Image: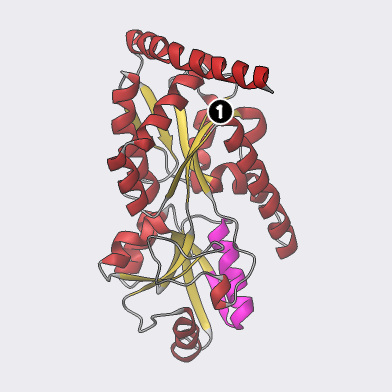
């Protein structure tokens, strides 16, 4: 046991000693790093990417630019990652939907997460939430259900950031649970969905807490339920899905970075080390937390394990729903 501990300590010290050399080599290469984001500018994922990119450039000593490739729930960005050279110049900041859910609901997504991508590191988990527009009188899930039954004749539409997503499956469960006719209205990302909610073009939406939290705080939208096994620290007044009668939504999604398959460990490690330092900066951690994230570093192995477990959970839920890949 002592020899094992000593060996791991030496490995850790060796990695730290090599990190400045790797950073220096990267800085001298003059390469610009692309951070692919599969959703439009102005959304929650974009805001997170720009915050991290600004600090990563300082740690890595190179330019780190966010490149938005919105469309198909991140599918276009994922395909761009697959096509990118495995030279350490392209990374993909994404959440669960693109890497875990899309391959389960799309017949030909154009990528295989396990074969085409390398997990790099994770940095947070978050909860999806149901939010109501201020144009409705509803202030709770029960209020919303009653409003749909009375004002909508039992029919209603709920916006979702992407088709065949976790939010879309949640819309189906909501309708079945409360015996109302709900349809999911898919958007090309959270930003256009929220714009329609703010304009009272659609009465409700399901998306991530980072997408909703600022408008919730300002009173422009009302978050009325969140996923997870416990209430979120940023929204302690909002009940969980389980509390309002919707069991099975305790598994939380995640955010992480992926690289093209074949990218060497020597190129991944400096980025991973820089990310660990960046999310530990008090100001960065506070801003991410304020966005509704639970910040916590995940190694390459931990992110890979988390992605596989999440895929397995949602594979069972999607199959049970009877959904057929499109």
Could one spot residue 82 in this view of the protein? Answer: yes
From the top left corner, tell me how far across and down residue 228 is, in percent: 54, 61
298 on left or right of 58: right
Q: Main secondary structure of the magenta part?
A: helix
Seen from the viewer's position, the closer of residues 205 and 108 is 205
Could one spot residue 106 in this view of the protein? Answer: no
Quarter residue 98 falls in: top right
Give the magenta range. Answer: 165-183
Q: Quadrant of the N terminus?
A: top right
From the top left corner, tell me how far across and down residue 63 is, in percent: 30, 22
Query: Magenta stretch containing residue 170, yes or no?
Result: yes
Up/down of 225 relative to 80, above or below? below
Up/down of 130 relative to 56, above or below? below
Disc 1 target residue: 82
Up/down of 49 relative to 43, above or below? above
The secondary structure type at the circle numbered 1 is helix
Picture residue at 44% right of the left edge, 20% below the top = 270
Query: Magenta stretch containing residue 229, yes or no?
Result: no
């Amino acid at each position: 046991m002592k020899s094992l501990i000593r060996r791991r300590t030496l490995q850790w010290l060796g990695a730290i000693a090599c990190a400045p050399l790797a950073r220096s080599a990267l800085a001298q290469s003059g390469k610009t790093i692309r951070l692919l984001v599969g959703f439009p500018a102005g959304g929650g994922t974009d805001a997170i990417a720009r915050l991290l990119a600004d600090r990563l450039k300082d740690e890595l000593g190179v330019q780190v630019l966010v490149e938005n490739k919105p469309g198909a729930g991140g599918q276009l960005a994922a395909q761009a990652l697959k096509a990118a050279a495995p030279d350490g110049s392209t990374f993909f900041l994404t959440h669960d939907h693109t890497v875990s859910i899309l391959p389960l609901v799309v017949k030909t997504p154009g990528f295989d997460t396990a074969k085409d991508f390398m997990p790099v590191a994770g940095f947070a988990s978050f909860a999806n939430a149901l939010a109501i527009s201020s144009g409705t009188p509803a202030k709770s899930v029960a209020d919303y259900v009653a409003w749909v039954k009375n004002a909508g004749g039992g029919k209603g539409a709920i916006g979702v950031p992407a088709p065949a997503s976790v939010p879309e499956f949640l819309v189906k469960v909501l309708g079945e649970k409360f015996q109302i006719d709900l349809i999911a209205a898919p958007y090309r990302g959270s930003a256009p969905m929220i714009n329609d909610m703010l304009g009272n073009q659609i009465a409700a939406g399901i998306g991530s807490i980072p997408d909703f939290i600022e408008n919730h705080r300002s009173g422009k939208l009302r978050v009325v339920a969140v996923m997870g096994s416990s209430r979120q620290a940023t929204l302690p007044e909002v009940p969980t899905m389980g509390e309002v009668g919707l069991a099975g939504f305790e598994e939380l999604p995640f955010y992480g970075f992926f690289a093209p398959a074949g990218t060497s460990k020597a190129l991944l490690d400096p980025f991973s080390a820089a990310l660990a330092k960046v999310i530990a900066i008090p100001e960065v951690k506070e801003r991410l937390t304020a966005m509704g994230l639970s910040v916590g570093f995940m190694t390459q192995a931990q992110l890979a394990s988390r992605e596989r477990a999440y895929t397995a959970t949602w594979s069972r839920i999607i199959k049970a729903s009877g959904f057929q890949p499109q």
